[in-house]
Image (spheres, coloured by chain):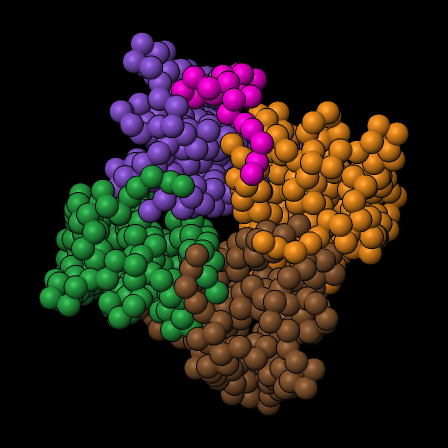
Chain colours: A brown, B green, C purple, D orange
Amino acid sequence: MDRGRLEAFSDGVFAVAITLLALNLAVKGPGNHNGTLAYQLAHQWAAYLAYLISFFTIGIIWVNHHILVSNILVVTRLLLFLNLLLLLFVVLIPVATGTVGDYLAAGGFDAKLAVAVYGIALTGMSVGFSAIAEWSLGEGRTRVPVPPDKRWEARIRFMSGGLVYLVVIGLAFISAPAALGLSGLVAVYYVLERTPALGKTGDEASGQDT
Amino acid sequence: MDRGRLEAFSDGVFAVAITLLALNLAVKGPGNHNGTLAYQLAHQWAAYLAYLISFFTIGIIWVNHHILVSNILVVTRLLLFLNLLLLLFVVLIPVATGTVGDYLAAGGFDAKLAVAVYGIALTGMSVGFSAIAEWSLGEGRTRVPVPPDKRWEARIRFMSGGLVYLVVIGLAFISAPAALGLSGLVAVYYVLERTPALGKTGDEASGQDT
Amino acid sequence: MDRGRLEAFSDGVFAVAITLLALNLAVKGPGNHNGTLAYQLAHQWAAYLAYLISFFTIGIIWVNHHILVSNILVVTRLLLFLNLLLLLFVVLIPVATGTVGDYLAAGGFDAKLAVAVYGIALTGMSVGFSAIAEWSLGEGRTRVPVPPDKRWEARIRFMSGGLVYLVVIGLAFISAPAALGLSGLVAVYYVLERTPALGKTGDEASGQDT
Amino acid sequence: MDRGRLEAFSDGVFAVAITLLALNLAVKGPGNHNGTLAYQLAHQWAAYLAYLISFFTIGIIWVNHHILVSNILVVTRLLLFLNLLLLLFVVLIPVATGTVGDYLAAGGFDAKLAVAVYGIALTGMSVGFSAIAEWSLGEGRTRVPVPPDKRWEARIRFMSGGLVYLVVIGLAFISAPAALGLSGLVAVYYVLERTPALGKTGDEASGQDT
């Protein structure tokens, strides 16, 4: 089992999940009970917002997943199952996004619960990612090892997203829109940040293709 | 992050999106209210048309995406996010195509709005593609750089599709079928044109596999 | 554009299409109007049959597609669009299979039309495949060229499937089950035949991986 | 046809199947007849359980598929069709999982039948995997051949999962939850076991990427 296949399978899952996201934006079609298309499209504002946040959240986790995995030297069964743990939550995101889109505009406890469930999926994804990152800190597992004195710095960086997602879950029960907005801020933060996981800069992480 | 993974992920998204397109052609199945199969199939003419246009539109953008990306030397975080911007709109195409198929035959404002929404998805896709192409014009980013005096020619070529898609959006509010037909003409044009993005001919762009 | 990316994209489309096939077997779930699960499962016999035939039909075309493409030296824009023509019909197969599953058991003209539509999708797929195979007969396009005196033999072999699918369309209007059975016989024939496309034996076509 | 393409296609199918699993967890959306979101989420406990078991079952078969295939030297048409036999049942798992999720909580004969159908899909998958493994025991087919005196040991190992799945089918008619639990225990067992198929240890099976 080499790294290439771990990446190919994960890429496939990320690609299917990110494409399924858009299916949540389908309107019901013409029909007496559905209202005009303009009404349906306007009514879906929460679905557009949730789509945007989820699209970039999956996109970022894909970018960071590959920066992390491309540095890994040995692929063990444990790593494969930690990767499955990550994917277990990634594939939940399209469904959770659809639930937010369906319930956010209605408001009330259902809206709060929908965003809390969304936050659980994001937290689980973050736990899965952190588990892979923690595994990669072990001796001899990466091409460019993280020096021992930098490990806590690295841990704090890759765990901080998960901590914010925990806040999203709690905040959802106070204000569903605020909690969804916070998960959007995490996406914006990770799009803008220049330092990817485990101490390499964005420029070092990229490079010329062979 | 090397170019191969950018391509693998994008290929996955393109492949899923192009396959989901066909799901819009599903009939409702037997049932008292659905009419005969012949009736349902004949009633779906707009869905077939939209399917054909979208299939070749995604196919062409896939072809041009790879000609463009295969020329790129450095993969930066910025490029990855520009690529995500492109994919953000590509995955909307199956849903927008389904909306056109559902509403075009009904006519009226809903039909116009459906094609305008479709035009927005195509315009967004074109903006994403142009952003990647513009990025690739920077110094040292491509194997075969575009000479400075040819850059505006290249820009005009890769931006012209987007400009026509803007016309599709406007034209939709005058005549939905004409606007859909125009987006189909863009697809026909790009299938027939011999000069792919950034100054390489179709024959130069292809070549013997290693 | 090298051969590897043509294959990766096609593999993605084949993989999604073959997986979507199974979604046609979903039952409606518990509910007063749906009947017991046993009733629903027994009622779906046509869907199982259509699933089996379509699964192996797509599987075979995937096998033959790769034997054909692995022999190709130059990837041109024309080849890419011939490949898109093939995929245009491959992605229709899940929907056409679902239509057969829904309408075959009901009998009558709808059942005949459903199988005829299925035959059209298979014929189109076969035309797309034949177009790629015909293209590959040109000078300097394949690693192991087909000698001129063997070209008609090769053409007859790769076109014969398409001719039988034309018969499926016509036969469907006489007997829907017989026409579906004939398309199943094509799949059985191609699973059992030892000579893949363009004159290479199964053993020559395979080989040790690097 | 080299091994790489067999893997790419299989990876695609595994990735789509494992991602489609999550779609079974979608709630019905707001509506007078659907109940609150909390009610719907709580009502879906069987769907969560089935999702978890199926996710890790497909994940494990993916891990073992690649350990098995990475050892194979020659790819023949027979192997390709044995692989299709495996995938024929893998793609059924999302649908079968959805059926379990829909019917388990209702209890009665429908719940038993749903788990039995699920067991049939798992048994078929296991038969397909065993067929590939049996094929790989032939002379000259693998890089690290299994010595003749170890073949029965290897056979027993890769067939034991299938035997337990046969028990799942039978047990389903006595107790649906117990049968589903047994299929979950198989997943837990394979996650924890250290000896992958055909006599290589987990550490030997993994290794440094080039």
Q: Is residue D142 above or below residue D139?
A: below
- Give the side of residue B166 with respect to residue D12, left or right: left
Q: Quadrant of the C terminus of chain D?
A: bottom right
The answer to which of B97 and C11 lies nearer the viewer is C11
Point 74% across, 61% down: residue: A78
Residue D3 in sight in this render:
yes
Residue B120 belongs to the span the image colors magenta: no
Q: Quarter of the image holding residue D93?
A: top right
Horizontal and vertical percent position of residue A70: 56, 63
Horizontal and vertical percent position of residue A48: 41, 72
Q: Quarter of the image holding residue C10?
A: top left
Please give the range of residues in magenta: C190-210
Q: Is residue D164 above or below residue A56?
A: above
- Give the side of residue C144 with respect to residue B191, left or right: right
Q: Is residue D6 above or below residue B91?
A: above
The answer to which of C105 and D51 lies nearer the viewer is D51
Point 55% across, 88% down: residue: A175
Q: Is residue A155 above or below residue C74?
A: below
Horizontal and vertical percent position of residue D206: 71, 52
